[in-house]
Structures are given as structure tokens and as C-alpha cells.
Image (tube, rainbow, N blue to C red):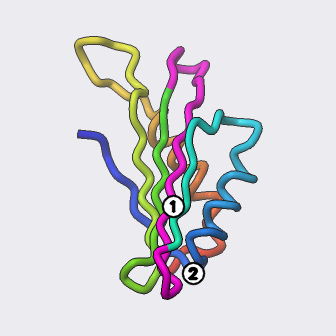
Amino acid sequence: MNEVFRLDISLQPDAAITLVKEGLTEQSELLHQELHNLGDGRMIGTLVYERYFFRTGNQAALVVIVDNLCGVSKVRLIPAGSSNSMLFKIDRGAGKSFASSVEKILSPYILK
């Protein structure tokens, strides 16, 4: 199972989704996006990205989920598909690097 990176942020999900989309435009291909307004200020948004890593010679995907269903906005970063082996799932750091790029974009808003 892949590692899931979790962040609590001070932004609303729609603002976080916008920032991530603006920050990853040149580096990655946005494959899917959605944002659902559930009423009462509650939202959940999802972004799915793909990026080619020259260093490892393979594609990696990143799923970004942002919601504020329990008050504070929570971000989950789920890297996938970054192994270039059929037998062994050796990431070589590509998935963590992909997730870290989103963490860097959101870093001014991360709650301690």
C-alpha cells in the first residue's frame, strides 16, 4: 500500500484546489478535477495528476483530496504508479517528490 501524506491547512478546499492547480501547471498533467459543495460551507475536492520522472524513467500519479467535513481543511496526497517494475514496487522517491511539490505549494497554510 502506498504512503498517504496528510496535512491540515487554514484554507478552504476550493482555495487549496486553485492554488495546487496554479502551482503544478508546467510540471504535471491534470487528468481529473472535481469540487463538490455540500452546503453549510462544507466542501470536498479531488485532483488527479500524472507526471513523467526522467530520473526514474517512469510515470507517476498523484491524487490530491481536500475536504473540510470535520471543520479544519484536511489534505491527503496519495502518490501511485511510480514504480517501473512489474515485480517490485520500488518508488525510488518519485512518489514522495510528487507529494512534496504539493506540500510546498500549500506550506504557507499548513497548521502545526
Name the residue: 49% across, 87% down: 40
Please give the count of numbered marks on the rendered protein.
2
Residue 39 on image: x %, y % = 49, 81
Q: Is label 2 in a helix, a strand or a loop?
A: loop
Residue 78 on image: x %, y % = 40, 47
- Specify the quadrant of the image occupied by residue 98: top right
Residue 54 on image: x %, y % = 61, 19
Residue 45 numbered mark, or none: 1
Residue 10 numbered mark, or none: 2
Q: Are marks 1 and 2 in contact (CB under 8 Å)?
A: no
Mark 1 vs mark 2, CA separation in Å:
15 Å
17 and 7: which one is in front? 17
Name the residue: 30% across, 41% down: 2
| Amino acid type, residue under disc 1 in the picture | Gly
Q: Is residue 33 above or below residue 106?
A: above
10 Å crowding of disc 2: few (<14), some (14-19), many (20+): some
Q: Quadrant of the N terminus?
A: top left
> Is 82 contained in the magenta span?
no
Give the residues in magenta.
38-59
Mainly helix, strand or loop, the magenta region?
Answer: strand
Name the residue: 39% across, 35% down: 80
10 Å crowding of disc 1: few (<14), some (14-19), many (20+): some
Question: Is 87 situated left or right of 105 in this image?
Answer: left
Nearer the N terminus, badge 1 or badge 2?
2
| Amino acid type, residue under disc 2 in the picture | Ser
Query: Is residue 62 something that shows in the picture?
Result: yes
